[in-house]
């Protein structure tokens, strides 16, 4: 019963996160910029930066990395129900989602399809792989310590 509940919860969270990604992608440029401006103002006080453009672009790209690292994580948590440590299967699915997301943006007014954004998304996924592997390593190390 616990496996069914875990499967249902991870599937639901995974689908909600993917839908959220596509919701953000469906926003036109002005709406997207307003949201990014709010995030920018929370992170960077106005008096610290003279050229806002570079910092603004940096924050957008870091947002891409975080967004797709979360996508990778929720897909990984779902797929581990079926495979043991499905790193590469999850990576392939996440890359396909990132590519489809960029293609989707191509059809939105004021948005563009960018291979660079897909590459930045992949960097976020690779960072998440390292984080997950680190936690699995620590878990395995802790279990080995109990056996000795």
Image (spheres, rainbow, N blue to C red):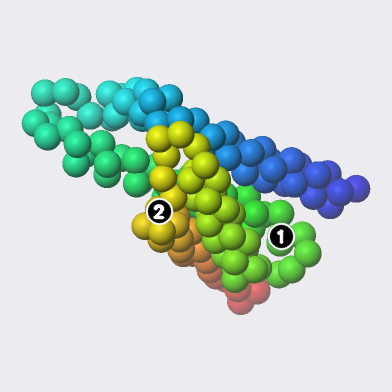
- Name the residue: 75% across, 46% down: 11
Regarding mark 2 in the picture, which secondary structure is present there? loop
Question: Do labels 2 and 1 touch, CB within 8 Å?
Answer: no
Q: Is residue 17 visible?
A: no
Decide if residue 133 is on the left or right side of residue 33: right
Q: Which sits in the foreground, 132 or 45?
A: 45
Q: Position of residue 122 (x, y in %)?
A: 45, 60
In terms of sequence position, does the residue under pointer 2 or pointer 1 come before the other? 1
78 and 93: which is toward the camera: 93
45 relative to 105, above or below: above
Q: Can residue 79 be seen?
A: yes
User: Which one is in front in this view, the residue at disc 2 or the one at disc 1?
Assistant: 2
* Residue 23 drawn at (x, y percent): 57, 34
Seen at 34% across and 46% down, the residue is 61
Q: Which residue is mark 2?
A: 114
- Quarter-wise, where is residue 14 in the image? top right
Vertical placement of 80 versus 107: above or below? below
- Give residue 41's quadrant in the image: top left
Question: Residue 147 location in percent, x, y?
Answer: 65, 74
Query: Can you say which quadrant of the picture contains the C terminus?
Result: bottom right
């Amino acid at each position: 019963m616990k496996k069914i509940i875990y499967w249902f919860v991870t599937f639901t969270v995974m689908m909600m996160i993917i839908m959220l990604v596509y919701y953000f992608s469906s926003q036109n440029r002005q709406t997207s910029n307003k949201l990014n401006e709010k995030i920018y103002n929370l992170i960077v006080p106005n008096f610290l930066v003279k050229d806002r453009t570079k910092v603004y672009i940096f924050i957008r790209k870091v947002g891409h990395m975080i967004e797709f690292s979360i996508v990778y994580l929720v897909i990984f948590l779902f797929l581990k129900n079926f495979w043991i440590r499905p790193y590469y299967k999850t990576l392939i699915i996440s890359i396909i989602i990132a590519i489809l997301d960029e293609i989707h943006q191509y059809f939105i007014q004021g948005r563009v399809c960018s291979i660079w954004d897909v590459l930045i998304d992949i960097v976020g996924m690779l960072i998440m792989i390292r984080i997950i592997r680190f936690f699995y390593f620590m878990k395995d190390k802790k279990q080995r310590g109990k056996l000795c």
